[in-house]
Image (cartoon, coloured by chain):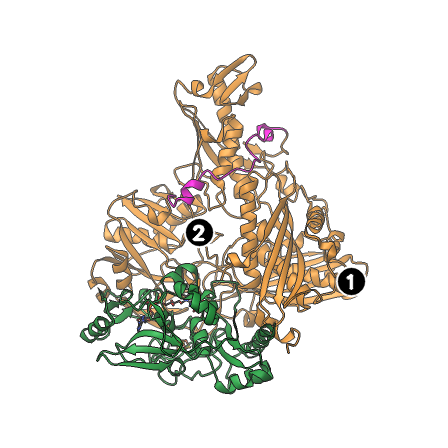
Amino acid sequence: MKFDTPATNNPIDQLKVVGKPTNRIDGPLKTTGTAPYAYERHDVVPNQAYGYVVGSAIAKGKIDSIDLKEAKAAPGVLAVVTAASAEMLGKGDFNTAKLLGGPEIQHYHQAIALVVAESFEQARAAAALVRVQYTRAKGNFDLATSLDGAVKPPAVFGTEPDSRFGDFDAAFASAPVKLDARYTTPDHSHAMMEPHASIASWDGDRLTLWTSNQMIAWSAGDVAKTLGIAKDKVRLVSPYIGGGFGGKLFVRSDAILAALGAKAAGRPVKVALPRPLMINNTTHRPATIQRIRLGATTDGKLTAIGHESWSGDLKGGGPETAVGQTRLLYAAPNRMTAMRLAVLDLPEGNAMRAPGEAPGLMALEIAIDEMAEKLGMDPVAFRVLNDTQVDPEKPERPFSQRRLNECLSIGAEKFGWKDRNPKPGLARDGRWLVGTGVAAAFRNNINEKSAARVRLDRNGLVIVETDMTDIGTGSYTIIAQTAAEMLGVPLTQVEVRLGDSLFPVSAGSGGQWGANSSTAGVYAACAQLRTAIVEKLGLDPADAVFEKGRVRLGGKSVALAKAAGGGEIVAEDLMEYGDLAQRFQQSTFGAHFVEAAVDAATGEIRIRRMLAVCAAGRILNPKAARSQVIGAMTMGAGAALMEELAVDKRFGFFVNHDLAGYEVPVHADIPSQEVIFLDEVDPTTSPMKAKGVGELGICGVAAAVANAVYHATGIRVRNYPVTLDKLLDKLPDVA
Amino acid sequence: MKSFTYERVDTPAAATAAFARTPGARFIAGGTNLLDLMKLEIETPGHLIDVSRIGLDRIEPTSDGGIRIGAMVRNTDLAADAQIRRDYGLVSRALVAGASGQLRNKATTAGNLLQRTRCPYFYDTNQPCNKRKPGSGCAAIGGFSRIHAIVGASDACIATHPSDMAVAMQALDAAVETIDTAGKTRRIALADFYRAPANTPHLETVLAPGELITAVTLPKPVGGTHIYHKVRDRASYAFALISVGAVVQRDGRGHVAIGGVGYKPWRIKAADAELPRGAKAATAALLAGAKTTHENAYKLPLVERTLASVLAQAKG
Ligand SMILES: Cc1cc2nc3c(=O)[nH]c(=O)nc-3n(C[C@H](O)[C@H](O)[C@H](O)COP(=O)(O)OP(=O)(O)OC[C@H]3O[C@@H](n4cnc5c(N)ncnc54)[C@H](O)[C@@H]3O)c2cc1C
Ligand code: SF4
């Protein structure tokens, strides 16, 4: 099915199942600990051995020698894999560095060997006996000192590095009110709960990987490419994923090394990356340095917006696209954005929840707060004033839906914004300085083509198969809701099977495109199935009504089970997209409000309450969508207050590579969260009329927190995370 | 993890005797620190002597009106003990500010005192670390040192001791009771228990090999207001950046110990004497001669400001 004109009325609009707050259908499995995650697939193949990854001890240079004698002689050891033994290993399209390094070393903890043994403990103990001699090379590990050498990168997913509109330089120079400020965001780790983990099993030349991966088709392709085998010889199975946040969009060393280990040992091998390896072995969100220049008239109209961002990556990598949202968020006749990329020899950077927008808004939305203050305007009013209903760089292109101003005004109302004293540093509650902050949330909507197969079996059960993944987001449930709505059956009569490369290729989970795209694919397949059912009954599909487990047409009504009585009815289809996303700018919007308190003596910052108002098309499952948003708000709070991969600029690695050192919020950090979704449908996105919220939820949060800290203390921190050491010397004196 | 053998003993004497038979062995109590270190091969004992069931799990009065806390009393039980809460509230508050409920259920009094530093380089066996591998260097000096020591450190090591409980005990003049492999018992003031890093940061206490902690004693209750303020980036489940444990009397006199600044909970008697004059004077005495890095210099004002806040709270 091709979606190339805005959706009109369709069966989804009945909203009997879709749009209802629905418990996750996989919830009982999760809460009872019985959802089968990759590392725990003891059932799928017998005789599994354990692999343990050895990571490089240096960040850059080469291996002079690896002595495997002791490791091979250790108890229980079955095989040791190194780059030397795994000849001709390729590199996947989505990887920057090799997943098995050597002799050249590209980053710290790059995998250089896998030790396979009978037990996990034996593999781990033997891995410590792999003796490696290195020659270190000088590396470049410091973004701040690399700005001069940074270059203009190629376009990323169609996003050009630079944009210009009007005459920014002249407009900025002549603007009566100006801001020119520099902001930094640090490297972030996805820090998802489930580590990267895979079990590999070979059957002749066919490989099966039970793994934890967000993008099945991409990754099956990259496994094949890396191992130099045909894609149809690779099967990936990933039905449950304990969090990914972009860290599992790609194949990582657990999968490749499990495959190589299984080949070498001649039996199935499982590999999980231990936490300390995850941080330097896999990808992270790259640090940025951003310069923002804003010019405005004295009455608060922005006349010039400039946003530049520098980030680093390994050679061949890409930039953090932190200026993307600035091209679209606020009106101004003169604009410029630019991204520059430095070569760094740190582990490879890549996507993490709302790549680009998350760090971009961390800077931009502080800048907007600063500008509002310079203008003597309320930060909500300033944003509302500078709204645009068209793409500011292509004014002929309207937004398909844009209700940012409503998000801001409804949020302000609910949050009690009007009681706020505009002057910072004045509200006190005992030893706490209290402040509130606001930020806009913005994340683009992306549609990806997505296919599904739907079967109606003889019992009237509807079975959906697609290689879509559920990374804890609730894909199972919204897909079941979609099929139930389309075929007029209760949720209990739908079975959803996901995450298997044998199933039709879906959009996968990333870029918050999963919900709308994958359900649209299921919609297309269900539409086909409706036709097939009706045709089977010899009726005209156009006026058929599917409800209560029956198909009704004119006076006739047949139970679905009966329709399939002669044998299962199967349909498969792919949803593809025309040019609606070019004709309309499709984005999601929100507003975040935060109240924070700062201990006047110690500078400790504690969030008191958070509110998000989101406008993101049809909300398919308000319960799961809320979970997505509060989770994202929590992650945003982490970015604001604590998350930072500490770079050792001498040795070139992230030092705090465990969850004791890399802090993410705990319950005590997040006392109260509220989420409001505006009632919205966007007929330009798909027949589902939905968009995504999983990434929107994090966008702007950190800036809202930073703005609240400013309002509480009068201290502006432009370098994240906002920690007490950055406040101390400016806090009021203590006796 | 290196493979190891394991035995469980049921008396203190059996524990030290087992050590005498297997030099290089380690005692294991709750295991919440030792096992993590063994998994990373930061500690590689060939033999473990499980002391978690040797008795020593009682909290009882001492003849001089103080209290004796068995070495194997769990952190949870100690924090919840009625007498501890009444007379030594600082201990209780410090404990519940640390780790998590699950960890405190396992962690013991002795194990808590002997937990090792949280310096991230200590945890990465690829990095130079004099504490882990004597003579290899100290990666934290010149590296990521935001959580490191500002007092008592050496050119060989700038690690801090991470315990919260020990800060409270230091402020309350605790002593450690031990028994050695020859069956000899002794009593060591907590103030003398930890060794300065000097050139041997791998030697952390004055305990002899195989010397078993049997109890921690606290002197007669001193009354006063007990405040433990642990400063950290996240609200729970994080080690202290710094902490202040103070017992303040109505007249402004009192005791104070600081966590997160040195290789041991930092207590300077001269600083106690300055307390009535306020945080500035007391901190000046506490942190005299402090040596900071670019990344941990904030701890100087932070200690003073936190202490000021604690003293203000104590006044009520
Ligand atoms: C995730 C995490 C967070 C934590 N957060 C905090 C925190 O915020 N604040 C804090 O203070 N602590 C914290 N801790 C540390 C925790 O308090 C310690 O791990 C615990 O107190 C150690 O006690 P244990 O009985 O488990 O010791 P073990 O691990 O069993 O032993 C520790 C050491 O003591 C030795 N030992 C044990 N008993 C004796 C004895 N009787 N005589 C001689 N030697 C002995 C062992 O040989 C070993 O060297 C945290 C730990 C973890 C894992
Ligand atoms: S500070 Fe101490 S523990 Fe840390 S690296 Fe240096 S020597 Fe090792």
Query: Helix, strand or loop at disc 1?
Result: loop
Task: Identify residue for label 2.
Answer: A250
Q: For the point 37% across and 80% down, which residue is it?
A: B201
* Mark before the other along the chain sequence, 1 or 2: 2
Q: Which chain is orange?
A: A
Q: Quadrant of residue A185?
A: bottom right
The residue sitting at 53% across, 29% down in the picture is A485
Which chain is home to disc 2? A
Figure chain in green:
B
Instruction: Give neighbour class at mark 1: few <14, some 14-19, many 20+ (Cα, 10 Å).
Output: some
User: Measured along the vertical axis of the image, is residue A412 above or below residue B69?
Assistant: above
Please provide percent x and percent y for residue A524: 52, 31
Q: Is the magenta stretch mostly helix, strand or loop?
A: loop
User: Residue B314: x and y, percent?
Assistant: 58, 74
Classify the position of the N terminus of chain A by image quarter. top right
Residue drawn at 60 percent across, 36 percent down: A689
Q: Tell me where the magenta segment starts and ends, as one range.
A: A9-35
Residue at numbered disc 1: A376
The answer to whether residue B69 is left or right of residue A510 is left
Residue B255's spot in the image, x, y percent?
50, 80
Can the viewer see residue B265 in this picture? no
Q: Which residue lies furthest to the right in this view?
A: A299
Residue B300 picture location, percent across and down:
55, 79
Closer to us: B163 or A686: B163
Is residue B228 shown in magenta? no
Vertical position of residue A211 compared to residue B178: above or below:
above
> Tag 2: residue type?
Phe
Q: What residue type is labelled 1?
A: Gly
Mark 1 vs mark 2: in front: 1
Q: Residues within 10 Å of mark 2 (few under 14, many from 20)?
A: many
The answer to whether one can see residue A664 in this image is: yes
